[in-house]
Amino acid sequence: MKPQFRYGGGQPARVSLSWRVLLHMASGHLERKSMIRRLLLIPFIGLALTVPAAAQAQAYPAKPVRIVTEFIAGAGGDISMRLIAGPMSAAMGQPIIIENSAGAGGIVATQQVARAAADGYTLLAITPTVPVVRVHLAKDNSFDALKELTPISTMIEPSIVLVANASLGISNLQELIDLAKKSPGKLSYGTNGVGSGPHLGTERIQMLAGISMLHVPYKAMQQAMIDAATGQIPMSWALAGPIAAQVKAAKVKVITLLNEKRYPVWPEVATIRETLPGYGAVPMWTGLFGPAGLPQPVVRRLSSELQKSLQDAEVRAKLASGGTQATGNTPEEFTAMIRAQIDLVGRIVKSAGIQPSD
């Protein structure tokens, strides 16, 4: 519709528009303004999406961080956690509190953290028992650590050696294999329990070497070590630190090392893989986890500060003096390691015929 011009009474010309035209024009004007506003806001929306993650990483931690562990106070694992936490606390500017929550092979501590808020202020330090071993050796294996927890990094690994009473007359793993082949099923060894790293490692040795030995599970590795030194049993797995005095006194001979790398204090002792190339390291680590859904900026900050602490010369020296090796890896590497070890332990358990307990 064209606008109508009217003249009269010497008055200035006026334009008369219908209300429909006015409404159409106004609507178009508002749409154009709205579109312009939306276009102008696009870069600010993108910026807003990146700010929370960056701000979270910078702000964390804003209060003390709690690490729940399965270790009893004063145990080797507890001492190691407190040692590692020192440099981390200093770097992050907040106290790191180690909370001992022992019980049920790590289940108590694990469930406590799995139920906590995923904000980085409640973390978990545990051994592979719950994440790996219980998957195959517990009747109730419904807990899935990779779904209920966020892996951050391994921290430490105890140096564990196989020692033989001096009267046995062997000095290395190959000599042990030769001896076991002469007396199938008669040579016994002690460990700290069914499904422990030493037990699984020995089962793997037997699988690869084609030998059979008798497993004697103890409640504590310390007692097994004492019995091997006194001749109650011919062999036992032992923590490198505590057994050192017995080795020096020539009461026992170090046969091999359960770890992937040689122990710096006894560099002449070969690892299992050096004698049996197909050997895959069994899980023995202590690792750091958070609840499921832990924000990635928090995961990265914790991982970064933990790696720095594990590389600290003083921390490494003190850990080594107690027979413990500092480890460390990325969250992705740790997750992949757990998956691979679940598979390895499953194959060992099936081959050895180890039955679930609980």
Image (cartoon, rainbow, N blue to C red):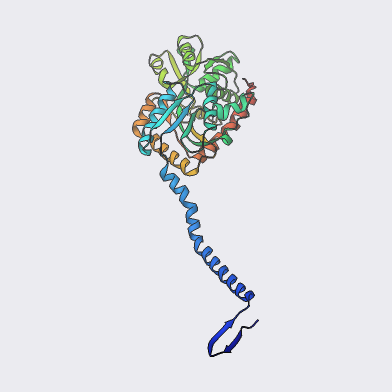
Residue most extreme to the left? 314
Residue 282 visible in the snapshot = no
Q: Is residue 221 above or below residue 342?
A: above
Residue 83 visible in the snapshot = yes
Q: Percent position (x, y) of residue 278?
A: 56, 31
- State the residue at coordinates (60%, 23%): 210
Q: From the image, which quarter does the N terminus lie in? A: bottom right
Q: Is residue 198 left or right of residue 19?
A: left
Q: How many marks?
A: 0
Q: Is residue 17 left or right of residue 170?
A: right
- State the residue at coordinates (36%, 38%): 91
Q: Is residue 267 left or right of residue 40?
A: left
Q: Is residue 30 above or below residue 272?
A: below
Q: Percent position (x, y) of residue 317?
A: 35, 29
- State the residue at coordinates (48%, 58%): 44
Q: Is residue 193 above or below residue 304?
A: above
Q: From the image, which quarter does the C terminus lie in? A: top right
Q: Percent position (x, y) of residue 41?
A: 50, 61
Q: Percent position (x, y) of residue 336?
A: 55, 38
Front residue of this view, candidates 79 and 159: 79
Residue most extreme to the front? 9
Residue 35, image quadrant: bottom right
